[in-house]
Image (cartoon, helix red, strand yellow):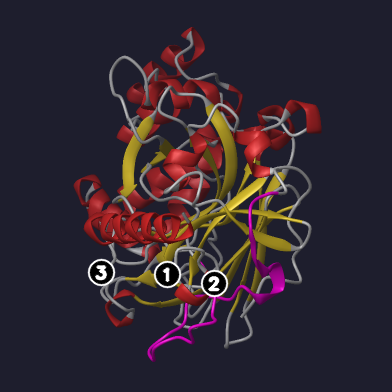
Amino acid sequence: MTVGKDPAPDGAVVARVWLPASRSGSGVGGPTPVAIRDGGVFDLSGEAATMADLLERADLLQLVMDARAPRVADLDEVVGRPRGTAPSEELVWWLSPIDLQVIKACGVTFAVSAIERVIEERAGGQADRARDLRARLTDAIGQDLSAVRPGSEAAARLKLRLIEDGLWSQYLEVAIGPDAEVFTKAPVLASIGTHDRIGVRRASAWNNSEPEAVLVVDASGRIVGATLGNDMNLRDFEGRSALLLGEAKDANASCAIGPWIRLFDPGAGFTLDALLATTVDLRITGADGLDLQGSNRLAEISRDPRDLVSQVIGETHQYPDGVALFLGTMFVPTADRTEPGGGFTHHPGDVVTISSALLGRLVNEVAVTETIEPWTFGIRSLWSTIEARRAASARLEEAGT
């Protein structure tokens, strides 16, 4: 499956692909940072071995638009990661555009998602209890939450009232309190790219995709660009206990990011404010005839993304290779899918499309986590590839002299 019919947005766009040895200037295949422009894929590995290195460059925008980088493929040649058999030596496929950055996520950043987290908690992971709880909570606090600024005096007053009414929750604390919910979504190098399979653990019977914008932040805390993400969530796991957040969020192939990173460039009109004025859309289609659609209106986020970034990276925590930060979602599918009261849950084979007019389309097929190819290419493998490329390039330079 290709994304060639989805042209890259205007401006400076970078990505990561698996480049076969036959197309690599060093003769060594592997993960490769690239620029996407003019309908082509341009190899930047001669300038930066990793995406983390690339995004630290002071001349980043100029480098990405530099015509001297070798063109290694047409955009419509790039495919999803091959399954099973050894891929052709000519095949180029999409990887997550994130490599050494730590992948963090913020939760409960929209009023609607806050209500859904409280429902999960009070339902104890049982989807059939969600409907009545949703109606009660929406009537009691829905309007208040959407209007209250987190950490404000009004938020403190609302907290006291909800405690008195017996409706307070740890999820409301991070929804309207001074401190955001921040967690690690996936290990370094564990995220998957577009047109790869995204996983749901076999033991989960209540789960959903979460369509999100993802900010890409360099080591200094500067927001350099944005991409799309699917924060796959197991509602029944976290609903049983908030201490199961790790199991609910992090498993093999549970985090998809891509297809590329669009770099912020005020001169070209692409800024964080421009991103926040748009939507991130979700569409899920299934073999049972499901065609579910929804939108994540970024303007309705309850916390300023700049504040979220400052809570993640700064004096209290440093990330020398940068951070990819999921901003949270307001759209959580709730309609019953298989039986009354059962809520929404994924079926294997569902196709999830997360899209934005400014960022492209991230497409993934849902599969049972335990049946997806194990994650084997980690930091040591990446380092071995980089060393092999450096050695090969040195030999080529020596032979040329």
Kindly identify the residue that appears in the image at 76 percent across and 71 percent down.
5
Element type at mark 1:
loop
Crowd around label 2: few <14 · some 14–19 · many ≥20 (10 Å): some
Q: Position of residue 349 (x, y in %)?
A: 50, 83
Callout 3: 10 Å neighbours few (<14), some, many (20+)?
few
Compare residues 49 and 157 and report the one nearer the observer: 49
Closer to the observer: label 2 or label 3?
2
Say which residue label 1 marks: 29
In the rendered image, the vertical position of residue 278 relative to residue 332, given as above or below: above
29 w.r.t. 361: above or below: below
Sequence-first tag of 2 and 1: 2
Query: What span is colored magenta in the figure?
Result: 68-94
Query: Where in the figure is residue 122, as x and y percent of width and height?
Result: 32, 48
Secondary structure beneath disc 2?
A: helix
Residue 158 drawn at (x, y percent): 45, 19
Query: In this view, which residue lies farthest toward the front?
Result: 401
Query: In the figure, is residue 99 to the left or right of 1?
Result: left
Mark nearer the N terminus (3 vs 1): 1
The answer to whether any part of residue 107 appears in the image is no
According to the picture, the residue beneath numbered tag 2 turns out to be 23
Q: The residue under label 2 is which amino acid type?
A: Arg
